[in-house]
Image (spheres, rainbow, N blue to C red):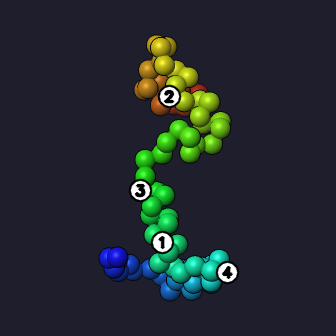
Amino acid sequence: MSKLTLSIDQTVILRAKRYAKRRGASVSRLVEEYLRVVSQPAEAKDLPPVLRMAMGVLKGTKAEPQEHKRHPERKYR
């Protein structure tokens, strides 16, 4: 197991220690789990159902990715 030094606000550290204690874990374990989750590429099965349903909806259409950005510009002029 490797060590990692982090600079974190003292208030955040105290809250993290209380949170970890309530859950019967260490702050190190919580940070490790968090980093494990955020560093993994998301798989479709891990996404909420509404996002899974929306994936691929535009495949085979003539929708342009830039249109998504232009729409709010036109809408809120």
Q: Amino acid at mark 4?
A: Arg
Q: Position of residue 63 (x, y in %)?
A: 48, 18
As measured in the structure, the alpha-carbon distance from the residue carrying label 2 to the one carrying label 3 is: 27 Å
Extreme front residue here?
Answer: 1
In the drawing, what numbered circle is on residue 22? 4
Residue 2 lies, with reference to residue 50, above or below; the image says below
Q: Quadrant of the C terminus?
A: top right
Q: Amino acid at mark 3?
A: Ser
Q: Amino acid at mark 2?
A: His
Which residue is rendered at x = 50% and y = 66% of the image? Answer: 33
Quickly name the residue at label 1.
31
Horizontal side, residue 46 vs residue 38: left or right: right
Number of other residues with Cα within 10 Å of mark 3, as a class: few under 14, some 14 to 19, many 20 or more? few
Q: Earlier in the sequence, mark 3 or mark 4?
A: 4
Q: Position of residue 64 (x, y in %)?
A: 44, 20
Quickly name the residue at label 3.
39
Quickly name the residue at label 2.
68
Q: Amino acid at mark 1?
A: Val
- The mark lying in front, picked from 2 and 4, is 4
Nearer to us in this view, 61 or 1: 1
Which residue is rendered at x = 65% and y = 38% of the image? Answer: 49
Asked which quadrant contains residue 54, the reply is: top right
In the drawing, what numbered circle is on residue 20? none
Which residue is rendered at x = 35% and y = 76% of the image? Answer: 1
Callout 4 secondary element: helix
Asked which quadrant contains residue 39, the reply is: bottom left
Callout 3 secondary element: helix
Number of other residues with Cα within 10 Å of mark 2, as a class: few under 14, some 14 to 19, many 20 or more? few
As measured in the structure, the alpha-carbon distance from the residue carrying label 2 to the one carrying label 1 is: 35 Å
Residue 29 lies, with reference to residue 76, above or below; the image says below
Q: Position of residue 32 (x, y in %)?
A: 45, 69
